[in-house]
Amino acid sequence: MRLWKQPASIRINADAFAVEGLDPPREPVALDDIQEVTFFKRDELTTDLICCDIVVCTAQGVETWFLHEELPGWDDLTRLLERLPGFDSQWFRKVAWPAFASNPTSVFKRV
C-alpha cells in the first residue's frame, strides 16, 4: 500500500518520525521499522521535486510512505534517516544531477 495523501508536516521524535495531517491519523514510524529508503526526483515542468519512498513494516503490513522536500520537517527527516546503518550519505548529489531526470537512488535497505 502506498500512502499518497498530502500530509501537512513531518515531526521527528527521538528515533521515529510522524506525519501530521493525515486522516485518519497514523502512528509514528520507528527507525527500526524502516525496511528501505529510496530518493528520487519528480519533474514538475520547470523545477524538480526531490522525493523519497520509505518502506516500513507495521502491524497492518508493509506500507510505502511518499514524502517530499516541500513538506515542513523534510530536513529533520533526512537527518533522522541518515542515522540508519549503512545509509548512503551521498544521496543528494546522486539524485540532484542531472536535472529533470528521476535519478532513483536506493540509500538504505535492511537485510
Image (cartoon, rainbow, N blue to C red):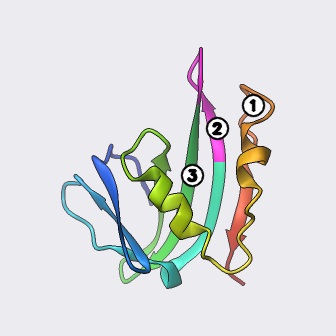
**Badge 1 element:** loop
Contact (CB < 8 A) between labels 2 and 3?
no
80 with respect to 107 (left or right): left
Q: Secondary structure at mark 2?
A: strand
View extreme (left): residue: 24
Q: Position of residue 89 (x, y in %)?
A: 73, 62
Compared to 98, does 54 lie above or below?
Answer: below
Secondary structure, mark 3, is strand
Residue under label 2, please give it. 41
Residue that appears at 59% across and 14% down: 46
> Which amino acid lies under the numbered mark 2 shown in the image of this protein?
Lys
Q: Is residue 55 magenta?
A: no
Q: Earlier in the sequence, mark 2 or mark 1?
A: 2
Give the residue type at disc 1.
Ala
Q: What residue is drawn where x is 71% and y is 63%?
A: 107
Q: Dividing the picture into quarters, in which one does residue 11 lie?
A: bottom left
The residue indicated by pointer 3 is 52
The crowding category of the residue bearing disc 3, from other C-alpha atoms within 10 Å (few below 14, some 14 to 19, many at least 20), is many
97, above or below 60, in the image: above
Closer to the camera in the image, 67 or 78: 78
Give the residue type that dot 3 points to. Answer: Cys
* Residue 55 in the image, given as x and y percentages of width and height: 54, 67
What quarter of the picture does the C terminus occupy?
bottom right
Pointers 2 and 1 in contact (C-beta within 8 Å):
yes
Corner quadrant of residue 79? bottom right
Q: Real-space Cα distance between discs 1 and 3?
A: 15 Å
Q: Which mark is residue 5?
A: none
* Span colored in magenta: 40-48
Residue at numbered disc 1: 101
- Depth check, front residue: 73 or 19: 73
